[in-house]
């Protein structure tokens, strides 16, 4: 009998779930997240979605090999505990999710940082196939990162190596970040600060963006494409900030491939060549050129990665 597993990717605004069998995604679901209310408050909705997928796919008792959770924070995968959060699911460190999975489904449980799981998904199934030296950067509500070096997933003594690329300093006297640092990549150019970046600009009143009820990267790129001066300028500024973050990661971790993922990749035709060009101009890589690629799996990357890790501990 084939074993099934459940992969869950906890995002800031959406939770993606998938049921896998033999590395095939049999069913996917997306539910709204209430990350500001904590993780405990989201568990009942998760339980309903998981139970429905198990019923739909005839996964009975004993056929579920495990539940894997991809989490947006620092995670100790050995003790299956959330170590630290950053304004999302802040009750996470108090929860015993291993006990939750065992009590509810009598199944094993795995948990890891979300960018790490997206990187593993891309490495095994997507844009990273064929390389063992990869950096992944996910740009969404926040910015996550992961380094795979010579085929090893970098974690470090305190489980935070490689996954804090969103908090590399790109401007030493820049915006205060939710992490406590100043001028992080995430504090300079991510979904949570884009609105402030636009509305505090002296040219805002003259921009078409002043008519938008919500300003995110989609509205920014769309206004820029229509010739809005402010949107065009801030778009380029954001792409330069992301490029600086990517170059820092290249200098730190020596990858041959950098994979960019997250919601902004809807504009990958502009972003990938821009970042690739900045990397070619400014990264110190005497051995050759680091290739910048777009995520192939997008929303499925972390779901596939965490489900893979359940069956293949790495
Ligand atoms: Zn930060």
Image (cartoon, rainbow, N blue to C red):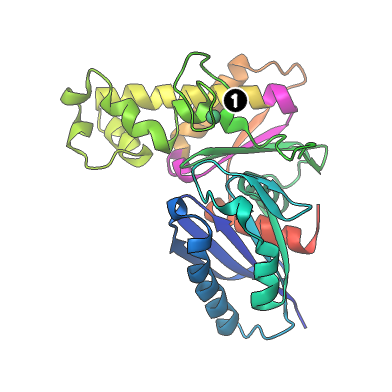
Q: Is residue 155 left or right of residue 264?
A: right
Q: Position of residue 2 (x, y in %)?
A: 75, 79
Quarter where residue 303 is shown: bottom right
Quadrant that contains the N terminus: bottom right
- Residue at 79% x, 52% y: name it: 78
- Residue at 43% x, 26% y: name it: 238
Q: Which residues are magenta?
A: 250-267
Residue 289 in sight here = no
Q: Is residue 117 left or right of residue 217?
A: right
Q: Position of residue 280 (x, y in %)?
A: 61, 20
Q: Is residue 62 magenta?
A: no
Q: How many numbered markers are drawn?
A: 1
- Ligand 1 within 8 Å of the CB at mark 1: no
Compare residues 14 and 217 and report the one nearer the observer.
14
- Residue at 63% x, 59% y: name it: 69
Q: Position of residue 265 (x, y in %)?
A: 48, 42
> Does residue 273 sit above or below 233 in this rendering?
below
Q: Is residue 3 left or right of residue 138?
A: right
């Amino acid at each position: 009998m084939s074993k099934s597993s459940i992969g869950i990717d906890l995002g800031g605004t959406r939770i993606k779930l998938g049921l896998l069998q033999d590395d095939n995604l049999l069913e996917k679901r997306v539910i709204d997240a209430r990350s500001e209310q904590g993780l405990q408050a989201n568990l009942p909705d998760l339980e309903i979605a998981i139970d429905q997928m198990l019923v739909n796919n005839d996964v009975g008792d004993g056929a579920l090999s495990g539940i894997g959770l991809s989490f947006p924070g620092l995670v100790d995968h050995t003790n299956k505990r959330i170590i630290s959060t950053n304004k999302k699911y802040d009750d996470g460190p108090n929860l015993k999710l291993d006990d939750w999975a065992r009590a509810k489904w009598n199944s094993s449980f795995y948990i890891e940082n979300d960018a790490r799981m997206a990187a593993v998904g891309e490495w095994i199934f997507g844009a990273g196939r064929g390389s063992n030296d990869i950096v992944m950067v996910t740009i969404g509500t926040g910015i996550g990162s992961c380094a795979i070096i010579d085929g090893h997933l970098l974690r470090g003594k305190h489980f935070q190596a490689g996954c804090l690329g969103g908090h590399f300093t790109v401007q030493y006297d820049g915006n205060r970040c939710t992490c406590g640092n100043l001028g992080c990549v995430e504090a300079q150019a991510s979904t949570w600060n884009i609105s402030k970046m636009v509305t505090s600009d002296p040219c805002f009143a003259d921009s078409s963006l002043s008519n938008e009820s919500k300003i995110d990267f989609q509205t920014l790129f769309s206004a820029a494409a229509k010739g809005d001066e402010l949107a065009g300028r801030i778009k380029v500024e954001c792409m330069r900030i992301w490029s600086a973050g990517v170059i820092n990661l290249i200098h730190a971790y020596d990858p041959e491939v950098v994979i960019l993922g997250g919601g902004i990749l809807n504009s990958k035709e502009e972003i990938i060549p821009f970042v690739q060009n900045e990397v070619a101009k400014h990264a110190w890589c005497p051995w050759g050129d680091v290739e910048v690629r777009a995520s192939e799996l997008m929303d499925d990357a972390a779901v596939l990665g965490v489900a893979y890790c359940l069956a293949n501990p790495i």
